[in-house]
Amino acid sequence: MSNANTSPPAGPGPAGGFFSSNPLLALILQRILLGFVLLLAISALLFMGIEFLPGDFAQSYLGQSATPEAVANIRKELGLNAPVHERYLSWLGGVLQGDFGTSWANKASVSEQIGKRLGNTLFLAFWAAVVSVPLAIGLGMIAVHYRNRFIDRLINVVSLGAISLPEFFTGYLLILFFAVNWGVAVFPSTVFADMAFTDRLAAIVLPCATLVLVVLAHMMRMTRAAILNIMSSAYIETAELKGLDAFRIIAKHAAPNAIAPIINVVALNLAYLVVGVVVVEVIFVYPGMGQYLVDAVTIRDMPVVQACGLVFAAVYIILNMIADVLGILANPRLRHPK
Amino acid sequence: MTDELKDLGLLVARGQVNRRDFMGRAAALGLAAPLATSLLSSTVLAAGPKKGGHMKVGMNGGTSADSLDPATFSSSIPFVFGRVWGETLTETSPVDGSPVPVLAESWEASADAKSWRFKIRKGVTFHNGKEMTADDVVATLLRHSDENAKSGALGVMKTIQGIKKDGDDGVLVTLDSGNADLPYMLSDYHLIIQPNGGVDEPAAGIGTGPYKVSVNEPGVRYAAERHEGHWRPEVGHADSIEILVINDLTARMAALTSGQVHMINRVDPKTIGLLKRAPTVSIENTAGRGHYVFIMHTDKEPFTNVDLRLALKHAMNREQMVEQILRGYGTVGNDFPINAAYANFSSDIPQRTFDPDKAKFHFKKSGHDGAVLLRTSNAAFNGAEDAAVLFQQSCAEAGIPIEIKREPADGYWSNVWNVQPFCTSYWGGRPTQDQMYSVAYQTGADWNDTKWSRPAFDELLVAARAELDEARRVELYREMALMVRDDGGLILPMFNDFIAAVSNKVGNYVHDAGGEMSNGFAPIRSWLA
């Protein structure tokens, strides 16, 4: 039977056949769809949450100088007197068309601002990830190789120590020694549009180091635990008996089978690098999303808060989705859920 | 002796000796501090300003929501940056607070102080190359008078009835009632003269100031380049100025001590000790008009009782407050909102002191029974919660029980201040006594936060406003101060200092009671040595 001349058979449509032959693709599409539903739910929660906060924009914006007339004027001008669901729907409509509205406080376009800020945040997160992920996995492997010996303990103690210090404290310590006492690092870490790439890199050294110290231990310990788990299996013993080099066993035979939990932890930490850096940004005066969000929350600048919240949620969902998919790719057993 | 000091002064001017060392040497030579200060500033000025350099300022008080539209200015950074790129008709003198001509060359008032003619300076150009004219001035003042513009200067502009051009170079301002303070009022930092009043493009950042805006990234940084041909040589010494938004105090201090910025604002009194250890930094604290207050609503129980109010006033330990809350960076208050930083101040009003016996006497006389409820939050001022506890302790010495209720910082200004009968609060002060009293002590004023209303006081206020005879004015203001002090609902334990810190590369930091950072002029008045 030639495929070229016959019409597709009835029953399961072409899509159905396509998906059943590509379970992985179906799974990914399903995840993406779920992600969208999740985002929608988050947007509603965000809207409600801000609605329930005490005080409103008009009052926070005017502060001590709020008179009832001034508050009423601002509320009227921003259309705050409309019912909640109407405002939510009109906002959602804008977002679906890629328009996050304008900031209530300075009437600037939120999308444009977020574009710049998100770029800065991703830049910092990217470099922190480039340093921390290979470092954590490498250190994890070294720790496995020297397990329960001095080097393993040293790596563990130092990375645990780093994670135990609150990040603002780590940040202040780095500033104190590298910027104030020794004067070798750039501080404040403010970056701006027309800055040369190398200046930009120099500016983010300290915040990047802080972030690396914060996320390192988590990933390193998960790598160590996952690989150790595999190291006790029979096939590793075979490899050892075969006389393979110890590092080769860890990197080539143990690590690939331990990859799923490692990917999960890495994804979580990458998400943290994007959405959890508010404190680091404030300390290092780095103009990213975190500072933008904090500014907006203090004055209840709703369009900005919602946009930031949504972007953060999207980053989180996307990274987790990638982790899931990579996990499934790495472990064929997960592709056929019972 | 003074020769040695003059030499030293020159070193200060060149930045080789810092101000603190100079003062120390002067004291060693037996020279009183005020004299040494004036000698220093005259020597430094005589040595002449140093031109050039890139001045960097790290400041608290800016968010990504800020705009360059002067009508919207409310936080510190737009205020200071506005001074960099824009100019007002008048400024106030850092020496005695009197109005100084800027874009207005001179002014004259009618005998009843109702009608004022301002002569506009010629030959001043905006950054866009256009010449500044009387039309621009009229348009600016009209824009800020418009209710819909929501200008921060609306309160100032409300009393103005008519603004019109008078001849080629004059602007005629008429008021609904006489006001001898109009030239002060026009020094308001919102009233930056813009081309055509900024009606077309309010946030363009084009003014007549010594610097042109080159970077405007709200909440991140601002920068400005020198405006060649600026008409006033005594300001604008550095080639360019950059303001970095550093809202975190520790980061601000680190930026200063590591030499990345030359000046910072709002140093916390608690950490001054640490900052002083840095060899390259000096603290510049200036007595200002801002005050920390405890306010009672005189129209609500139990504070309708003047004896209870007096009891609480006498139970306030002011010296302790200044010592503990401000770490000495402030001065004691006297239960009226005026201090020596205002023009026409009477220094002979007796200082109220902590007196548990008097407090006890008045408390008994008031017949009040039970605890007095005080609401507080650190949103009111930095350390308000501690101040409330100190007050509770000093009241306990007088046998007055105080119950403290901590309120959330969020919404403090809308839910507690001006609503609840007894709470802690803050006032930033105003340029003139008249404005301070009009905004918060006149019957029916929006922000009359003690709900105090005395027709006799209101009459005095109007009379003093239109009084052009200085001596008579001082007399009237003295009488008003006594009324607020002895009858009002205000307990004013302290006036806080503005505390800035500068690196030893900065020359000529001018102390100005008008506002923080040398009333916002620090970047353009100072130079880099």
Image (cartoon, coloured by chain):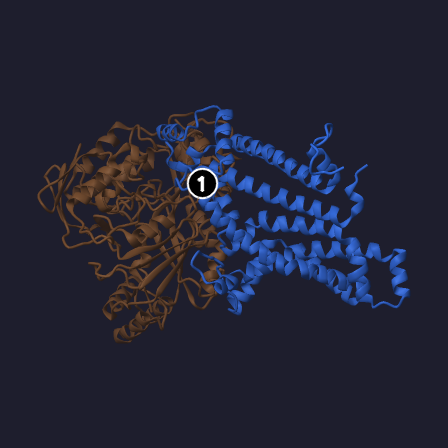
Chain colours: A blue, B brown
Residue furthest to the top in view is: A83
Residue B484 locus on image (x, y percent): 31, 36
From this viewpoint, is residue B407 visible? Answer: no
Check disc 1: other Cα within 10 Å, few if <14, some if 14-19, many if 20+. Answer: many
Whether residue A36 can be seen here: yes
Looking at the picture, which amino acid does disc 1 mark?
A: Ala
Taking the view exactly as shown, the residue that stands out farthest to the left is B167
Quarter of image, res B17: bottom left
Element type where label 1 sits in the image: loop
The residue located at (62%, 44%) in the rendering is: A318
Q: Is residue B321 above or below residue B444?
A: below
Quadrant containing the C terminus of chain B in the rendered view: bottom left
**Front residue of B282 and A315:** A315
Residue at the spot of label 1? B380
Locate residue A263, reporting x and y percent. Answer: 71, 51
Q: Position of residue A105 (x, y in %)?
A: 41, 39
Q: Quadrant of residue B473?
A: top left
- Reply above or below: A43 against B97: above
Q: Nearer the viewer, residue B447 or B194?
A: B194
> Chain letter of disc 1?
B
From the viewer's perspective, is A154 left or right of B179? right
Please tell me whether residue B33 is drawn above or below residue B189 in the rendered image: below
Q: Is residue A143 above or below residue B373?
A: below
Write the residue at 51% across / 66% down.
A180
Q: Looking at this view, is A256 or B482 the one in front?
A: A256
Location of the N terminus of chain B by quadrant is bottom left
- Residue B311 placed where, x, y %? 42, 35
